[in-house]
Image (spheres, rainbow, N blue to C red):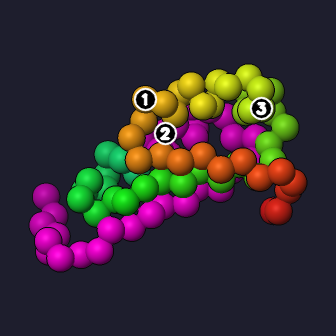
Amino acid sequence: GIVYPDDLPTASVIIIFYNEPLSTLFRSVNSVLNRTPPQFLYEIILVDDFSDAVWLKSKTQQLEDLLRTVPKVTLIRLTKRHG
């Protein structure tokens, strides 16, 4: 595999989504977690661009429940579309 210098800085990965299927969203998160050396990944920030899909609505808590088991992930929900 690839050998990286130990003195590289950490990075945050921001994934912005709108009405994304949960399976696709989790594949993206898992790809980042599985393919990034852990010492270089500071966090993954998921930004919900005011999705209106039932499975992503905050009152269902479905996304939040799934994210509880995933390390280094923060969810931000926007209160209006920014595009």
Whichever of callouts 3 and 1 sits on the residue coming sooner in the sequence is 3
Say whether residue 4 is left or right of residue 36.
left
- Determine the residue positioned at 48% across, 46% down: 73
Secondary structure beneath dot 3 equals loop
User: Which amino acid lies under the numbered mark 3 shown in the image of this protein?
Assistant: Lys
The picture quadrant where one finds residue 7 is: bottom left
Q: Residues within 10 Å of mark 2 (few under 14, many from 20)?
A: few
Q: CA distance from mark 3 to mark 1?
A: 19 Å
Q: Residues within 10 Å of mark 3 (few under 14, many from 20)?
A: some
User: Which amino acid lies under the numbered mark 2 shown in the image of this protein?
Assistant: Arg
Q: Which residues are magenta?
A: 1-30
Secondary structure beneath dot 1 equals loop
Does the stretch in magenta take in 66?
no
- Determine the residue positioned at 82% across, 62% down: 82
Location of residue 63 in the rendering, given as x and y in whole percent from the top left corner: 62, 31
Q: Identify residue for label 3.
A: 57
Nearer to the camera, 67 or 19: 67
The picture quadrant where one finds residue 5 is: bottom left
Q: Identify residue for label 2.
A: 27
Location of residue 1 in the rendering, given as x and y in whole percent from the top left corner: 13, 58
User: Which amino acid lies under the numbered mark 1 shown in the image of this protein?
Assistant: Thr
- What is the number of the mark on residue 77? none
Q: Identify residue for label 1.
A: 69
Number of disc labels:
3
